[in-house]
Image (tube, rainbow, N blue to C red):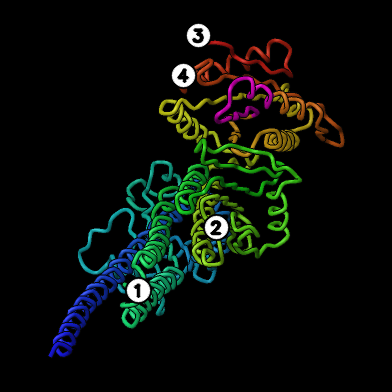
Amino acid sequence: MEKKTEGSGQDWLLRYKKKIILAIVWIITAAVVLTMLTIAWTLRAQLMTQSMLQAQELGALIHSSLNHLMQVRDPDRMQTTLEAIGRENPSLVRAFILDSRGRVAYSTDRREIDSVIDRFTHVSCKGCHSGAVVVPHDTTMTITIEGKRVQRYVHVIENQPSCHGCHAASTRINGKLIIDRSLEATDALVRTVVAIICILGFGCLLVLVPFLWRILSKGVNTYIAEIRLKSSELVTLYSIVERLSTTIDLEELKRIIIDIISDAYRADEIDMVMPSEYREMGAIVWSKTGRSMARKKVDPASELHGLIQRWLEDPAAEPSVTGNGRSITMPVAKGGTRLALIVVHSSQQTFDEEHLPLIRGMANHIAVAFDNAMLYQLAITDELTGLYSPRYFRQAISKKHVLFEEYGEKMTLLMVDIDNFKRVNDTHGHPAGDAILKEVSRCILSAVRTDDLAFRYGGEEFAVILPATDPDAGKAVAERMRALIEHYPFKADQHVLSITVSIGIAAWPASAETIKEIILQADKALYEAKHSGKNRVVVREGKE
């Protein structure tokens, strides 16, 4: 009887344990399924939203690029520009401009030009033109064309006063810019993410059910840590998709990328190297101690220099882990074009091959963001010199002023003017003058550093913003620039010309505290340099 009672007690405990395990299994099953569905739906919505924003940004960039050509009435360049944009954007199915009669005036596919699209009968137009629908100025929608899903962006081209030279003033709309961007990559990514989530989820269930008792007996903490790791990777991927879509400004993008990577990998230091046509290879370095970005020159004897050389020699380089497991390299490229090399160092964790899939995913998203930022870079660049445009100067200096007001970050402004430039134009002609402007711009880019911003401010006047730089350091950069230009062999009509520049310098907070003041002080310093003999650098001391 005692043995039977003891056995019955053990059977009761066993049944009780089984009920607990069964309850835990059901709870875990329901939680995993719900989590899979929530994450899959959220990621799908975010990816589609990001794709829509990218379509809108691409449309805005194309419209911005074509707007000037519309004003100067250059149809050939508008057509060639559209075709170039089509070639440079693999995701772009087509982009075309309809006139007010529905005729295709310009298109990335020349074969479509002069064809007529009836907005009330054509299948691709029924999203907006199906009955009494008020069509907004800008529309982004998902449609299916020839069995393929695309994101269509429609921008109405209003009849502005500047257009009345070609269009009657009574006309309200001159036409529409329509961009079809393929959703194939986005849909493939969504399917891949959903498949990964499902495989991970059901895989976890298949493992948990037969081995749950052993898992509980050995301790759940180890498996909780693994789940947290997977969750962290998914959260990181979600964060990348969300945060990278917030800007197309290259400098802001660098900060966001470094923030994401430092949070994801508990990094001690991050090096970011970007190719440059005119400068020596340099790197932006972020350190955990100062939590700020700074420039550094790459030592030829350093490990970073070796990583850069291997990256430059191999266009198809993949992310990798260094031998000691304390660093990872993340090459960022799109369409065979090198965009950046990111090297992450950490003393708090050891990297291994398991980190590489997430790193590849991060690199792909970063490549898309960099590519979009570089398209924006084209829109804010002066066509002749390759420097930033005067219009972007106001935007850039306003952003630096915000950093000054909020964090006290120093900044130095250089105003650079070519001495006796009118004499060059009068003696050798404007083509020679344009060539001089290009070469001087190259010298300026060679003299400044990776994060410095150089602008064409006027005809032969340039501006350079030196972030986080005091007047003494700014003067050193200016002197290097002045000497480089003075000794550069400029050529015109088979003659070697001696070209010099005068440079005026003002800084926050040494000589100014507002945007208007720093520009005024730099202009005064430039005036002083001009009227005290030219070919010199003058620093504006103190405030007025």
Q: What's the residue at 29%, 68% (across, down)? A: 35
Foreground label between 2 and 3: 2
Residue 27 figure quarter:
bottom left
Instruction: Check residue 544 in the rendering and tell me which mark sits there, or answer none.
Output: 3
Q: Amino acid at mark 2?
A: Thr
- Quarter in which the N terminus is drawn: bottom left
Ranked by sequence position, the earlier of labels 1 and 3 is 1
Q: Residue at x 59, y 62 (%)?
A: 319
Q: Magenta segment range?
A: 460-478
Out of 238 and 414, give the one closest to the viewer.
238
Numbered disc 3: secondary structure? loop
Label 4: element kind: loop
Front of the two marks 1 and 3: 1
Secondary structure, mark 2, is: loop
Residue 268 colored in magenta in the image: no
Residue 284: x, y in percent?
60, 42
- Residue 176: percent from left, percent from top: 39, 58
Taking 476 as reference, is 345 above or below it?
below
Sequence-earlier tag: 2 or 1: 1
The residue beneath circle 1 is 215
Residue 471: in magenta span: yes
Amino acid tagged 1: Ile
Q: Which residue is mark 4?
A: 513
- Mark 1: give few (<14), some (14-19) or many (20+) Cα within 10 Å: some
- Mark 1 or mark 4, whichever is nearer to me: 1
Query: How far apart, in angstroms, are the residues tagged by discs 2 and 1?
Result: 25 Å
- Can residue 504 be seen here? The reply is yes
Q: Is residue 175 visible?
A: no
- State the separation of the CA atoms marked 4 and 2: 46 Å
Q: Based on the displayed image, in which of its 4 quarters is residue 389 positioned?
A: top right
- With 107 as the anchor, is 129 left or right in this view? left
- Residue under circle 2? 350
